[in-house]
Image (spheres, rainbow, N blue to C red):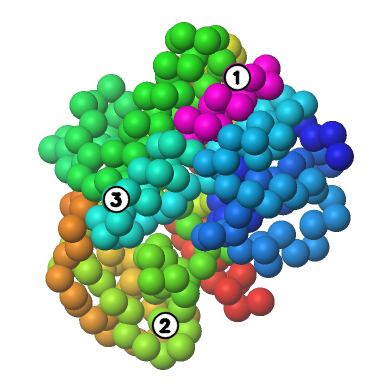
C-alpha cells in the first residue's frame, strides 16, 4: 500500500495514538515496529487500514523500505525509560541513537518532506529555573536523556547539512489511553491507576513532593501533526510539548484516589537515579511556530484515561 505517513514505533503508546488519528482522518499510514516495547493490540481494529512493516529501526534495508514513497516520517520508535537506560546504557544508545540515525538516513534517501522526532523533557535535567525553555543549556542526567538530546542534534544536522526538514518535540510526561501499566518501566500515571484499581498501594519514588508537567496524549498527537504543516521556518528547531503547569506526585496520586474512590495510602521508596526533581514546560515557541497549544487540562485528561482503563 502506498502511504503518506510512516510512523516508526506505531505499535507503541504515542505512536498508536498518532496512527489511529491519521486513520480516522482517512490518511494512508505505514507503521514500522518490531514490537519489542510496542504492542500489537494497540493496533486492533485498524490493522487492515495500515501498511505494517515488522522490523527494527536499526536495520538499514528495513528502514529504507519503510520510508520509500512517504511524505512524512513521525519517528516515535525508541527504547523508553530512564531506569532502563541506567541499567543498560548500550541498548538505549543502540536503539535511540543509532536507530534514529538510520531513520534520518533513510528519510533523506527517500526524499521525505519532513521528519518529526520524539524527544524528551529529560534532556534539561535539574534546571534551577522553571518553566524550562528551549534556549536553556541541556544537562542530561541519564543515558536515556542523553540519547534523546543526541537524536535532536542529528535531526538538526540533517536539516542544516542536507536540507531535510526536521522537527524535535520535547515531550513532558505524556499520559493517556493505551499506556501500558504492566511493564517494570511503566510511566507513573498508568502505574498509579492500575494499583488503585486493584486496591494496592501506589508506589511513589522519593518524597512525592517532586513536580511534573503532565501532557495528555491527544495534545502530543496534535503537536506531531502540526509539524507536518508548520511554516518551513520552524524546521531544524526543538519544541517543548507540555501542559504548561505542574503538580506534585503526592497531589497527583491523591487526585486519582478521589477519582477512583480509593484511599490515599501510597508506599514510598527511595528516589531513582536519573530522575529530575521538578519539571514544567514553557510552550510559547510551539505556539508561535507550530500554531499549537494544549487543548486538554490535567483533570480532563485523567478522566479520559481512567475511563479508558475502565472500559
> For residue 60, what is the image quadrant?
top right
- Does residue 136 show up? yes
Work out how far the residue at label 3 is from the one at label 2, CA to CA, in angstroms. Answer: 32 Å
- The reply to whether the magenta stretch includes residue 111 is yes
Q: Which of the marked residues, 3 or 2, is nearer the chain's N terminus?
A: 3
Task: Indicate whether 245 appears above or below 88.
Answer: above
The local secondary structure at tag 3 comes to helix
Task: Indicate whether 132 appears above or below 207.
Answer: above
| Residue range of the region highlighted in magenta in the rendering | 100-120
Cβ–Cβ under 8 Å for marks 1 and 3 = no
Q: Quadrant of the N terminus?
A: top right
The furthest residue to the bottom: 199
- Count of number-bearing discs: 3
Which residue lies at the image location 40% right of the left edge and 44% below the top edge? 94
Task: Indicate whether 133 appears above or below 258.
Answer: above
The local secondary structure at tag 2 comes to helix
Identify residue for label 1. Answer: 108
Nearest to the observer: residue 258 or residue 17: 17
Residue 196 shows which numbered tag?
2
- The reply to whether the magenta stretch includes residue 186 is no
Residue 89 shows which numbered tag?
3
Q: Residues within 10 Å of mark 1 (few under 14, many from 20)?
A: many
Residue 215 image point, x, y percent:
45, 49
> For residue 223, what is the image quadrant?
top right
Residue 216 image point, x, y percent:
51, 52
The local secondary structure at tag 1 comes to helix
Q: Which of the marked residues, 1 or 2, is nearer the chain's N terminus?
A: 1
Work out how far the residue at label 1 is from the one at label 3, CA to CA, in angstroms. Answer: 28 Å
Amino acid at each position: 500500500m502506498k502511504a503518506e505517513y510512516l510512523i516508526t514505533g506505531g505499535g507503541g503508546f504515542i505512536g498508536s495514538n498518532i496512527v489511529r488519528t491519521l486513520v480516522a482522518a482517512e490518511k494512508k499510514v505505514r507503521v514500522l515496529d518490531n514490537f519489542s516495547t510496542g504492542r500489537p493490540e494497540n493496533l486492533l481494529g485498524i490493522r487492515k487500514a495500515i501498511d505494517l512493516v515488522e522490523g527494527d529501526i536499526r536495520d538499514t534495508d528495513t528502514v529504507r523500505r519503510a520510508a520509500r514513497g512517504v511524505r512524512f516520517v513521525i519517528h516515535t520508535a525508541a527504547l523508553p525509560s530512564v531506569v532502563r537506560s541506567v541499567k543498560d546504557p548500550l541498548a538505549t544508545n543502540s536503539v535511540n541513537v543509532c536507530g534514529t540515525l538510520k531513520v534520518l538516513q533513510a528519510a533523506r534517501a527517500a526524499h521525505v518532506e519532513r521528519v518529526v522526532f520524539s524527544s524528551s523533557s529529560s534532556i534539561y535535567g535539574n534546571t534551577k529555573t522553571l518553566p524550562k525553555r528551549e534556549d536553556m543549556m541541556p544537562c542530561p542526567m541519564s543515558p536515556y536523556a542523553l540519547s534523546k538530546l543526541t537524536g535532536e542534534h542529528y535531526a538538526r544536522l540533517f536539516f542544516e547539512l542536507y536540507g531535510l526538514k526536521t522537527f524535535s518535540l520535547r515531550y513532558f510526561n505524556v499520559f493517556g489511553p493505551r499506556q501500558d501499566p504492566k511493564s517494570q518501566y511503566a510511566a507513573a500515571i498508568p502505574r498509579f491507576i492500575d494499583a488503585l484499581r486493584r486496591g494496592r498501594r501506589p508506589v511513589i519514588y522519593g518524597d512525592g513532593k517532586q513536580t511534573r508537567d503532565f501532557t495528555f496524549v491527544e495534545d502530543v498527537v496534535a503537536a506531531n501533526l502540526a509539524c507536518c504543516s508548520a511554516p518551513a521556518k520552524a524546521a531544524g528547531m526543538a519544541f517543548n510539548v507540555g501542559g504548561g503547569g505542574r503538580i506534585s506526585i503526592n497531589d497527583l496520586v491523591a487526585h486519582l484516589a478521589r477519582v477512583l474512590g480509593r484511599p490515599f495510602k501510597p508506599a514510598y521508596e527511595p528516589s531513582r537515579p536519573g530522575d529530575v526533581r521538578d519539571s514544567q514546560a514553557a510552550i510559547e515557541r510551539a505556539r508561535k511556530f507550530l500554531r499549537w497549544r494544549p487543548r486538554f487540562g490535567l483533570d480532563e485528561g485523567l478522566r479520559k484515561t481512567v475511563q479508558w482503563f475502565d472500559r
